[in-house]
Image (cartoon, grey):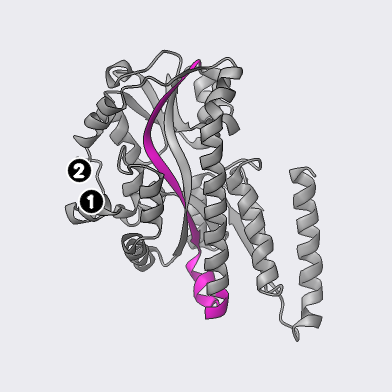
Amino acid sequence: MSSQLKRLKKTAICTITALALPLLAGGVKAENLKWAHVYEESTPYHEWAEWAADEINTRTDGRYTIEVYPAASLGKESEINESLSLGTVDIIYTGSTFVGRVYGPLAIPSGPFMLRDFDHFNAYANSDLFRDMGAEYKKEAAHEIVSLTYYGRRMVTSNKMIKTPADMKGMKLRVPPAPLFQMFAESVGANATPIAFSEVYLALSQGAVDGQENPLPTIKFKKFHEVQKYISLTGHIIDSLVTVVAGQRWDAMSDADKEIFSTVLKEAAAGAGSDILKSENELADWFRGEGVEVIEDVDREAFRSAAMKVHNGKYASWPQDIYDRFQAIK
């Protein structure tokens, strides 16, 4: 079944449920929520968001229906973050750096070589530190951070071979429009060029930038390999997506419904992360089959050493004690 047909089927089911609900629940109508994100329909992030929408509808006996809007159809990432406060969307996926604009320490996992590996990511996602920082974000933004999804290890793509930090000196590197991503560019001497996610392919194809960095699944989904000759397996950032529910929606829920949302959204995060991790382990060979040169003999220790020097520099949005707690997580 195509994604379009799935969405049409889901919309029809939600409409029927909403019409029938007053008869089933004494006149109480379903709450209709919008979930916005910037990722393609074919990604695990979207597929698991749709699963979560259906699951929440089922577990709440139809009290909530959720329509998922992928591929920046309701706006770029900065715009959907604003839409949470405007009340025009109810749930979003967003990067750690975007919630870090509200409460700086939440951006810390998106720093280069901040997370050691997937186990460190998983421990952080379930840590007191993440919960504490989510509570601080709630005080500032009024929105509820519910779960953290593994986004993958970011790799550098370019039209020249990159094996060491010196190979990136002076190159125009596309970075997401969030200051923290300039930390990696600074560490290798590249010129950071912030460009919105939806505009990266065009920028690469027109030569506006020399390269970009994203996890292998994202490089495939966005077809960046069509306009880049090399993928260097730097793995310099283990990135994540935060699932945020608008405060006005969350605060209006019963405790029972909050528990359902929390449970389902965490299950969806785990499912999407597992799918991404699996695909990462398979994609290097897939890219080779597409004619891309995948560079494995990268001097990761040199990249790590360069990054460590700027961890608590001008782009850091966290105090030393948060940094120490983060690094101590096992």
> Which residue corresponds to the image point at 81% horizontal and 82% vertical from the top-left?
23
Q: Quadrant of residue 186?
A: top left
Sequence order check, earlier mark of 2 and 1: 2
Q: Is residue 152 left or right of residue 178?
A: right
Residue 151 to residue 31: above or below: above
Q: Residues within 10 Å of mark 1 (few under 14, many from 20)?
A: some
In the picture of the structure, the residue carrying the numbered disc 2 is: 312
Question: Which residue is at the front of the view, 283 or 81?
Answer: 283
Residue 254 lies within the magenta run: yes
Residue 330 lies within the magenta run: no
Question: Which residue is at the front of the view, 144 or 140?
Answer: 144
Amino acid type, label 2: Asn
Q: Is residue 250 left or right of residue 121?
A: right
**Coordinates of residue 85 in the picture (x, y in percent):** 48, 62
Helix, strand or loop at label 1? It is: helix
Outermost residue to the bottom: 26
Amino acid type, label 1: Tyr
Residue 97 to residue 58: above or below: above
Q: Residues within 10 Å of mark 2 (few under 14, many from 20)?
A: some
**Coordinates of residue 291 in the picture (x, y in percent):** 58, 14
Q: Is residue 244 left or right of residue 59?
A: left
| Range drawn in magenta | 229-257
> Which of the two discs, 2 and 1, sits closer to the camera?
1
The residues tagged by marks 2 and 1 sit, at their Cα atoms, a distance apart of 8 Å
Q: Quadrant of residue 154?
A: top left
Helix, strand or loop at label 2? It is: loop
In the picture of the structure, the residue carrying the numbered disc 1 is: 323
Question: Which residue is at the front of the view, 275 or 92?
Answer: 275
**Coordinates of residue 228 in the picture (x, y in percent):** 51, 18
Q: Is residue 259 left or right of residue 133?
A: right
Residue 191 to residue 240: above or below: above
**Coordinates of residue 120 in the picture (x, y in percent):** 35, 49
